Image (tube, helix red, strand yellow):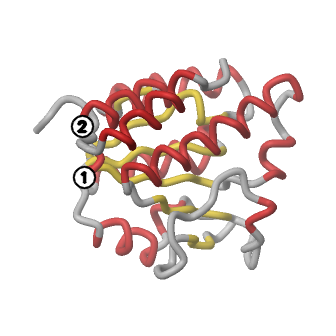
Amino acid sequence: MVATSVPDTSCLLVVEPTMDSLKALPSAIQSNTAAKFKSLDEAADLTKVPRYFATYEKGKKQQDKWLSSPCENTQQRVYPCLPTQAPWQNDDLVTAIKSENRERLFVCGFWLDASLGTAALEAFVEGFDVHLLVDLSFSRSEIGRADTIHRLTQYGIVPITISQLIFEWMSWTTNDEAASALKLIASNLPK
């Protein structure tokens, strides 16, 4: 196995990437957070990394209410979850992600101290090499965030930033145009 993130073996699971979730964050970070989700979309599109969504608001398929967007319309990419269950308990979502035959799963979204953290643990148990995009994973409290990240790393889930991920994808990209675009995206990420 390669230590860095290779696009051909990567897949993304984004949990509850909605404007409503964003509004629950401090207003000072909302704009940068939205921009980072858009940058992740662009990088995933350039490297052809599939994105899957787990959402808790049934019927909420209006993309204008999302911080991120599915990578293609020819395949189901958005999976509604029951309010009392973690995303990994949605069998259709798990089957779809597994059908990609990609061993490295990057998870991010809302809420780390609840459904997002649980999804990461369950994916790890299922055999995925799970990485947590720490600067795109939010918790309802800072104490809960720190405790959850500590617990996830104890299980072997690897924390990574969006900048690190994009640079790693760039290093494996053979298309010069795509590599240049990835470098530009990573270089212009909001702090």
Residue topped by disc 1: 8
Residue 108 image point, x, y percent: 54, 43
Confirm or deny contact between disc 1 and disc 2 (CB under 8 A). yes
Q: Is residue 61 left or right of residue 73?
A: right
Relative to 125, say whether 112 is above or below: above
Q: Secondary structure at mark 2?
A: helix
* Residue 77 spot, x, y in % from top left: 52, 71
Q: How many other residues sit within 10 Å of disc 2, few (<14), some (14-19) or many (≥20)? A: some
Vertical comparison of 1 with 123: above or below:
above
Residue occupying the far front of the picture: 177
Q: Which residue lies at the image location 49% right of the left edge and 62% below the top edge?
A: 52
Residue drawn at x 34%, y 34% as measured from the top left: 170
* Front in this rendered view, residue 180 or 167: 180
Could you tell me which secondary element the residue under label 1 belongs to?
A: helix
**Tag in front: 1 or 2:** 2
Task: Please give left or right for residue 171 compared with residue 24 in the image.
Answer: left
User: Quadrant of the rendered structure where residue 145 is?
Assistant: top right
Q: Which residue is mark 2?
A: 172
Q: Nearer the viewer, residue 162 or 157?
A: 162
Quadrant where the C terminus is found in the figure: top right
Please report the residue visible at 10 percent of the width from the left and 38 percent of the height from the top.
1
Q: Is residue 78 left or right of residue 92?
A: right
What amino acid is labelled 1 in the image?
Asp
